[in-house]
Amino acid sequence: MDEIPPGIEYLIKTLPGLATPALITYLVSHAARTFLELHIPAWLLWTGVSLSLPIWFTASVLFIDWKDHWDAAKLGAALAPRLKDPYPGGLRTLKKGAKLFRNAPIGSAIATFTAETGTRTFNTRTLFQNRIITDEPEHLQAILATQFDDHDKGPEIGYLLHPLLGTGVFNSDGDMWKFHRTLTRPFFARDRLSSISHFSTFTTQFDLAYSSLSSRFKEGHPVDFQEVAARFTLGCALEILLGWRGVDDSTLKYPFYVNQALGSQDTGDEWEYTWNGQDPVTMSQFVPAFVRAQYVTAHRMRYSVHWPLTEFWEDKLKKPMKVVHGFIDGIVKQALERKKEIFSEQSNDDKLEEEEEETLLESLVKETEEILDPIILRDEIMNMVVAGRDTTACLLTFSIYMLADHPHVLKKLRDEILENIGPNKIPTFDDLKGMKYLRAVLNETLRLFPPVPFNVRRTNKPVVWPAKSGKPYYIPARSRTPISVYTMQRRKDLWGLDDQFSHSRPYKALDFDPDRFIDDRLHKYLVPNPFIYLPFNAGPRICLGQQFAYNEASFFLVRLLQEFQSISLVPEAIPLASRPPREWAETDKKAGATRREKIWVKSHFTMYAQDGLWVALRKAKTSEEF
Ligand code: HEM
Ligand SMILES: *[C@@H]1O[C@H](CO)[C@@H](O)[C@H](O)[C@H]1NC(C)=O
């Protein structure tokens, strides 16, 4: 083996630190014996040495606790309420949290802890670390906007995301983040996003999706729309960001019963290295490797810096990242070669005039004139592809889920499309601008199913968060501050108590109801308090791709509903073990839901439907409309 296994490396790094108190105890006792001629019996010495670590640890925990209280009091602030836990290190909380995470609907852990503490900002204090979880708009505003400089992603997130993303806009802080943000932002300028080339990519990619959908329906099988959406958004990202024009050699998967009949096994977590390390990486090699790399990274996030203990002998990211980098590097190399060509031919200035249509990669190649570092380019691209693919696919997937489940919304949306654009015109940027109901459908989907449901920041110095009433909260330096957009955007007190607003129209926070973004509720809830709705985050790190995503998703939905007139879910196509457990009906009812989820909603970095969103679509009868 030519490299040290991750577990061994972890132990080599960690053990000396853990042994220090014992070593100090030993040396001090030894010195006392030798120089002060104290009589310390061997049993006492060895007891002292073995207890030194727990004693030192307990003392430092107690000291920090005391200091936090003291510092809070000095500022006239309070500490965020702590979850009660009879065990040290928050073991009960950890165990309960893990169980709810595995077996209960998404967000249940936070809802349960909120109910236990009676407050929306609380400290779970697990593993002796402050984890101050919040879904309070004032506090999200402080973290993301008003006190932006005091809350960053922190070195731990940077370290965990580094193998996947290198150094890029997503996983850096401070000046490094500013550098990357400045480098990539011009690409997302409004005039670029409305450019014809983007819309012609959307057209090509939609046509691919359409033909794979149609042929599958012709065979009489439902499709996993989540997979269709992910291919569409990846295709758009690769083409628009990188100028990639390859072929997708992969095929849509069949429902599990077809696979069973064919005798093949399709288990999502399994992944096999199929690249020979030389030929250009194909789509059917890249996509599973890319999915696998994100999966392993998400898994590591849960164990934080201790992840090597779960991948003791083998770094599970190595192989998939080799394939992913092989794919991206190939494209980067081509772009760099193109640039060299352009340089050598460049006596006429004509080439520079094409700026409007350039890809992100091309604009980066230009920006990094001096450096021309393929690794920086690759990192930047990885950041964009990760940021843009699953998020937008998630928006599309859950829009389809909601439209299938709310035929009256689907009908209204289709009417808007046919009225504004017609049954077969390819929509342009200007066409999309006027589609108010379409935007409301997307907004409402992003409210109930935010693609990034949870996020995390940490304080880089002691801070004070404002309070609506009572004392403000003192948040010690280096506290983690997870934010839960998901539970916030479903809060009844923020989005409409059952029938709080009007007796004739009972508006419920958990209902899918796009009109809340159009009628008087918009001015009642969202306009005065914009921080109750943060699917794209807020403040200086707000999503760069928001408009891009709205364009892409709008285009897809318009084209889809021009071609198809109804959508139905096919829950039988979800493997049994991946269907939402029956017992959840009770939980849902208690939470006030009028609707029971027909898919198992989960989240790694982004939200997804476990084992897919299986649907069947019915073709539009164009003749019917005229
Ligand atoms: C519906 C689709 C999308 C949603 C819901 C979404 C949501 C978000 C969220 C919540 C963040 C903050 C992440 C964090 O700070 O940890 C973010 C950041 C970002 N997003 Fe998006 N995003 C979407 C689509 C896109 C697309 C299509 C692109 C690019 C093509 C993109 C590019 C970025 C970038 C570059 C950042 C990092 C900004 C920074 O840290 O300064 N996003 N997005
Ligand atoms: C959609 O949400 C955004 C907030 O992100 C809001 O500014 C906009 O007015 C909403 N539009 C519609 C039509 O729902």
Image (cartoon, grey):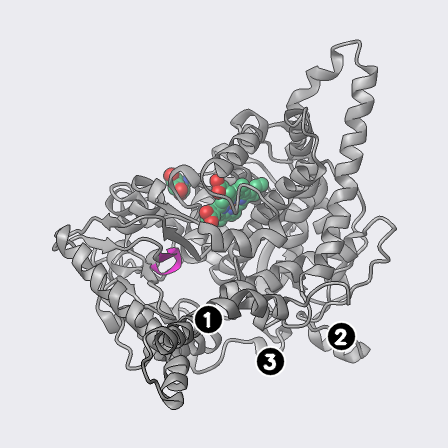
Residue named by callout 3: 576
Please provide percent x and percent y for residue 571. 58, 72
Tag 3: amino acid: Leu
- Rounded to the nearest whole Å, what is the CA distance between mark 3 and mark 1? 46 Å
Residue at 40 percent of width and 37 percent of height:
540
Residue named by callout 2: 259
Tag 1: amino acid: Leu
- Helix, strand or loop: magenta stretch: strand
**Could you tell me which quadrant the C terminus lies in?**
top right
Please provide percent x and percent y for residue 464. 23, 49
**Could you tell me which quadrant the N terminus lies in?**
bottom right
Q: Earlier in the sequence, mark 3 or mark 1?
A: 1
Mark 1 CB within 8 Å of ligand 1: no
As rendered, which of 611 and 261 lies closer to the eye?
Answer: 611
Tag 2: amino acid: Asn
Please provide percent x and percent y for residue 611. 61, 69
Q: Which secondary structure lies at badge 1?
A: helix
Identify the magenta region: 480-487
As rendered, which of 181 and 88 lies closer to the eye?
Answer: 88
Is 64 placed above or below 162 here?
Answer: below
Q: Is residue 475 left or right of residue 620?
A: left
Q: Which secondary structure lies at badge 2?
A: helix
